[in-house]
Each structure stands twice: as C-alpha cells, then as structure tokens.
Amino acid sequence: MSETPAEQPGAAPPPPDSEPPETFAARLSARYRIGGIVAPLITTVVAFLAGGIVVGATGHNPLSTYRAIFNGTGLNWLFPWVSGADRVDAAINLQQTLIQTTPLILTGLAVAFAFRCGMFNIGGQGQYLVGAYVAIFVGSSWAHLAGPAHVFLAVALAALAGAVWGGIAGFLKATTGAHEVISTIMLNWVAIWVGDYFFGLSGPFQGPDQFNPISNTVADSAKLPVFWGDPELQGLHVGIFIALGALVVFWVILNRTTIGYEVRAVGFNPSAAEYGGISVKKNYFRAMAISGMFAGCAGAMDILGWEFNLSTPAIHASSIGFIGVAVALLGRNTAIGTFLGALLFGALYVGTSTRQLDATVFDPQLASNLTLIIQGLVVLFVGADLLIIGIWQWRKRVRLRTRQPAG
Amino acid sequence: MAASPVLELRGITKQFPGVLANDHIDLDLKRGEVHALLGENGAGKSTLMNILYGLYRPDEGEISVNGKPVTFSSAKDAIAQGIGMVHQHFMLIPVMTVAENIVLGAEPTGAGIMLDYGAARERVREIARTFGFQVDPDARVENITVGQQQRVEILKALYRRADILILDEPTAVLTPQEATELFGILRSLKAEGMSVIFISHKLNEVLDIADRISVLRRGKKIDTVPRAGVTEEGLARMMVGRDVLLRVEKPPASVGDPLLEIHDLHVLDDRDIAKVRGVSLQVRAGEILGIAGVDGNGQTELVEAVTGLRTSSSGTIAVAGKTMPRHAHSRAMLDAGTGHIPEDRQRRGLVLEFSLAENIALHDYCYPPDSEHGWLFPRRLIQHARRLIKDFDVRGGGPTTRAGALSGGNQQKVVVAREVDRNPKVLVAAQPTRGLDVGAIEYVHRRLVTERDEGRAILLVSLELEEILSLSDRILVMFEGQIVGEYPPTATEEELGLAMIGAGKEHAA
C-alpha cells in the first residue's frame, strides 16, 4: 500500500486510507460525487445523439424529428411566443406529459428511497400494481362515501398495499437475508398474475363486461379532479401535486427526520450504523415499506387520475415501475433529480407516441419503436456513465502509481 | 564497515496532485549498514521507497547504485541492480511451498520448461544456510507463521541476488518475539555485507537495529544522524517538529466501584467457533484495565459482546451494577453507559460518507437536542460538532466536511470526541491508536488517562505491548479465548510476550 500524503494545509485532501467503501450504495454515492451534476446531463445528451443516429439511419432528418418530438411533449407551451392553435395543442400535449410524469416520479422515488438504504428495489412494478388493484377495489365499491373521503381512502389504502408488498421483501431480507433483488423480482410476478386472475375472464373482480378481462370502473366520487384541460378529454388531474408533494416528503424524511438519518447511515455503512445503535434489520424492513408506499401511490394516481379501470393486457404491458429504476438512476437518487428524470421519461413517452408525433415528420408506425430506442439508450448510458466514471477513477489511480515525467 | 555508499539518492522530488510527497531528498546507504527511515504517516517514506524500487518515477533527482547513475522504469530494473523490497503485505501464494514461492518468476529449469524443483530446494537451502535462516523449503506458505512468511519474502529477495534490502514497516505484523528474531536475521545479513533500509515509525526498534537514522517530515528530510548519541525524545522531536511526551504521565489511580463486570462469558464468532471461552473480569471506576494478546485470541469478540454488537452464548455482563440481558443490542449498551472506540474506525467508527456533524451524532441522533419526536435538527448537530471540533482540536475540516476527507489521526479524534463527550461510565477502547502517528498517539493516550481520572472505567484492548504497559493500571493477558494471567504495569514485555503465546507462568487472575 502506498503511503497517503495527509495533513497538507490548504491542499486538496487526498483520500486517506483509501479503502473502498463497504456497500454498493456507498460506492455509488462516491461515484456520483465525482460525476456531479454534469455526468447525468452528458449521459442524456449522448443518448439523444445516439438516438439521432438511429433516426438518421431510417432516412429521416434527426433535427426535425427531435423538434417534432419536442413539440409532441407540449413543452413548447412554456415558450410565450407559441400562440393560437399551436398553444391549444401544446397545452393538451403538456397535460399528457405531466399525466405520465406523475407515476414516474413516484416509482422513481420508490427506487431512490430503497437505494438510500443500500438496497436495490426492482419491485416497483409489483408495488405499483397492488396499489392499482386496491385503488380499483376501493374506488369502484365504496361509492357511498363522500368525494374527498373516497379519494383519500383509495389513495391511502393503495399506498398501504404498496408498503405491504415492499415490506415483504424488506422483512425477508431482515429475517432470512434473502436478497431484495431476487425477492422483489419474484413479487413482481406474483402481483402480475394475481391481477391477471382478479380481472381475467370470470375472475373474482372482473367488471360488468363478461367478454373482456377488464375490471370495474371507479366511481366518479373516487376520481382525482382534473384542474387543467377538459375532464372528458383526459385533462391533467391533481395527482401531479401529490407526486410533487411526495418529492418534498422524500427529501424531508431523508434529511430532517431520525428515520432518514438511520436510512442513510445503514445505506452507507451498516456496520457503523449498528455500532451507532441503529437496528439495521428494522431499517431494511422500514425502508422497503416506505419505498413500496411511493410505488403503491403511483398505482392509485394512474387508476384514479385517468385510467379508471384495468385490463389484464394492460397489467402485462405496464412498465412504469421499471422505468422508475432508470428515473432514479438518472436522477442520482435525489428528489430534484428524480423529478427531472421523471419529466424526461414522461416527455419522451408522450412526445414519441403515435398520437402526438407529427406523422409527416416521422412515420407513426416507427414512432413507438423510437420511444423504446431512446429510452433504452438513456438507460444504457446511465449504466455506462457509472462505468465510465469507474474506469476514469481506476485510470487515475493507475496513473498516480506509474506517472511518467513530462516530456 | 566500508565507507563508500552502495546507493545514493540526490535531490529526489515527487509531486502528487496537491501534495509535495518528496521534496529534494538526499540519502546515502553504506555497505553493511542498517539505515532506518523514520517518519510519521504521510511523511513520504513509502513514496521515496517506491521511487527507489522503480514503482514511481521521480519528477526530479537522481539515483546511483555503486557510483553509477541509474534510472528505473519498473521494479524489474531495480531488481536487476540488486535492490530487493519486502512489502508490509506479503506477496506470496499460500498454496505453494516455500521453495516454489521463492523461485517464482526466476525458476531454475531442468529439461526444457519444467521446473527443476530439486535444484530450487537446494538453492533455497544454500541461501538459508549462508544467512542463518530457519525455514523448511517444502512447507506450504499457508501453514507457516507470519514471521516465517516474512523470512520467505526476504529469501525471495536474496535469491534474486539483492544486496540492498528495503523493509517497509516489517515489525507491524510481528509479535515481540518474532521481531527479535527478525532483528537477529538483519544483523547476520549485515555481517554478510548486505545493506538494509528499514522503514518504521516506531522509535524503540529503530534505536535497536539501525546504524544511522534519517528522519522525514512532510516530504522533507530533516536530518541523518548516527545511532550513537540520539534518544527517543530527540528522534520524536525531529519527526513531529515539537516536543512530544512519550511516557504517559499518569498519577496513581484512585479506584472506585466496579462499573463493568463480566462473568464467565462465552462468545462465538461468525463461523460459530468459540472465541471467548469463559472470561471473567471487572473494571472499576478510575482505572484502566489493559488486555494484551496476539491478534485473533478473542479480543475482538470480547469487545463486540461488551458493546452489544455480538450476542454472547452464555455468561453475564453488568454495566454500573445493572446486569444486561443477553440479547442486548448496541443501543441498550449505549444507553446503559458504555462508550466504544472501535478497532476499525473506517468500518465501524465512522460513516465516511457522512459529515462530521452527522458522525458526531451517530449515537445520540435519536435524543434531544439532536432530535425531538423524530424530527432531526441539523443546525443543532452542526453546533454540537463545532464545539467538539474546537475542544478536541480536529483539523482538516468543519462540521459539514465529509469524514472520509480527514486524515486518520483526525478521524480518530472525531471518534474519541464523540465517545468521551457522551460521558460514558465504561469506555471500551479497542486499539485506539492503530495506524496513528506519534503526535496523535500522544493525544489519544493523554485523553484516555484524563478520562480515567474523571472516574470512568476503561477497558483497553491493544496489540501494542508498549501501549498496554504505559497506560494500564492492571493487565490481563488473553490467549485462545481465556484470561491466562494478571500482571501489574511493572511487568516486562518479555513476561507478557510469553504469556501471550500461552507459555507464561500461570498467574492468579
């Protein structure tokens, strides 16, 4: 081991006794710190450049395609010079983008929170789904409740269901040491097939339509009110405020409560946390439950905000929980980063959808593939960016060891 | 002793980003001398030796061997010039025999490419005989002691015809007896005309073995002095740059009631092997009880059981007269009044990613004033940290600095500050000065004595006999999970050393 030069006044502090941090979360955070805010920005730009090459390969102009995608997201609504019919279109598009952003914020938080406790929650999808099931059940059956109470109960119980689903994985990790990646993946499948059974043909919760595997529809009293746009045309519901509130809750829990202190201590160094008097096992359970709560809440937002019912093909096709992993990774597991990541993926989804993308610029048949390609590229580059930072650090270490004199 | 230098370093300078690790260092090595390189952690000793061994290139300066200027671009070049290095962490392959390890990379070949094992063994025997080594060439490295492994490393260098040997902190891993044996070997190497550079930060052993001593401080060479006429105090002053109190000054203990009582404690390790086997002891208010022992004789498990980090399999622990439940978690032990300076501050004692303020709150974050009803008050954490940083003279950062950005000595000050400031009745200090330099050691030692005089019961566990002898009011020796003797602080290192390997006369414990 080389001696680490220390205690040089004014000098940049070199890593003292540079042992690698113990947990994945600690290593990741060390890399994040080096990459700063620049790395995720570069990641995104590079992903779009690579996407542009794909667009170019299909014989389209990448610049005009991206411009059309951007207009499809409705984000041009923010520009004051967009007016008239364009502005009306932009508003409708932006409402769609924010409707997609809402659950992505919440599933992103579900991944980020577990991450801060040193765990990788791949189970956002399952937690999202059980939240959605409970939201449908409460929303469609307790119609005698007054509006606000109905909505509140549906959201709260959906969040609780997600918490239970996440908590199972946390409980298993705390008591038997079962790795959360494995157990959450399996719980995803349990959630998917339970839904398939519930709402499938002649399932116990199949809706009135005997010939289609679709659930009951939630009552009007349980629907989240639309505050922007036409409720009949899928305007923007108030769920976006719940999601924004969840971002604040996430930040406050982590930084201003003893629960958050424990979560972060366990995430960085479980041995030191235990030494500090913190029960590591309790925190594994609690952090997974809180994570699941965010994801379960996401399920309620979609059901009570705009979907209102759920079909079994939709259950199988849904990937909101998985995109949450990319959102959290791109957002560095922070509140503000998760918001920006969710907005990016929500906008991408809407901007490239066949409905929003200008068909004269890009063939509608190709458009939905383009969504997946760009999403895939962003996810790929998020992973690669950690890899690149890792390689960069490694090279720096090697160079320190064997640095050649100049010239 | 021939006077012509076999090795000369002139004006060696090495700059790392932000740090001048070596600043125009001159050094010469005579034939047949042991030249000690003394300095605190971070003084630039290892950097200099890595330059000499071809692992780093100097930015400036030149090296000459036997009067000829040389440049090294890799360790291979250094070896070719007769320089051998024994690292602190051995580079041996455990499943191979001693002889195989020694010839590895320069194997005598018989017919074609096959290893001529017989020739290898013969050659190893021959070298061992020349220098008076006791090794079995056919033993597997995994089956021999650390001291013997070190000899294999030295033999490896000799096999490659080294006549300049660099030893990097060679005694750090050895028991006192093994260290004495090493010094015997070094003397016989010297008699055969070998030259040795001996890197250390321990004053007593440098005075024991060296012919000349060069002291480095903050990348500069302070002086080179002959062994004759220097004292420990003088060397310490050169190393640290100020007067250092080496002997801990300690008034006689005024002992009170027993605050920590352990009765017939048994503890298993992670692999369910009994590591503590029936330990009973008492630590009273106002005394330091030292536990000496070779690493791995159950000290770690004992400390973990006392601090609630490991559940004992039987026996009782009482803190301040209150018997703790067997499954008491670390939180219960903390609340009962124990403080703990853990043996590994980076793994246990600190969350390196946390700020100093968050680290200082590690035990009491859940109590007022740090938090109320689950709400944390970061500003109060920072205020608290600011006070401790000032009182305990922590340098290198403020309350919001990441703990990982501090030097080892200052990290340890943060740990000590936190534990002492909680005002514990019982303070468990496990290797509290591991990896610290002279100045920081002095600080921690003085602090432990102050805490003793405040009326705390202090359980000191250390692998450093000198530390045990200078701090303890009573000494227990632990061997294979049991207390094998109690000694007064006037005991000699030899007495304790024998007891530590299970060969001591049985003392009434």
Image (cartoon, coloured by chain):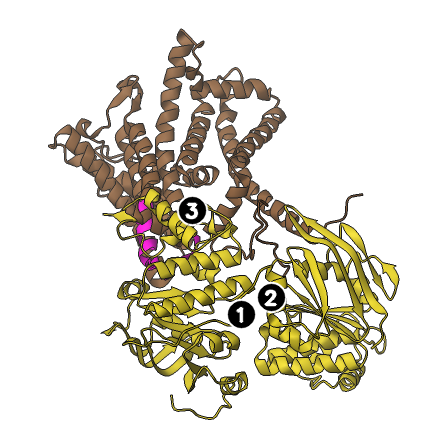
- Among the chains pictured, the one given brown colouring is A
Q: CA distance from mark 2 to mark 1?
A: 8 Å
- Horizontal side of residue A8 vs A104, given as left or right: right
Chain B color in figure = yellow
Instruction: Tell me what residue is drawn at x 51 percent, y 79 percent.
Output: B294
| Residue drawn at 43 percent across, 44 percent down | B400
Viewer-proximal residue, B50 or A402? B50
Quarter of the picture holding the N terminus of chain A: bottom right
**Residue closer to the observer: B85 or A57:** B85
Residue B109 as seen in the image, left or right of residue A377: right
Distance from label 2 to label 3 (Cα)?
31 Å
Q: Position of residue B29 (x, y in %)?
A: 79, 68
The magenta span reads A267-291
**Which residue is located at x 37 percent, y 17 percent?**
A92
| Residue at far left of view | A144
Q: Amino acid at mark 1?
A: Leu
Q: CA distance from mark 1 to mark 3?
A: 31 Å
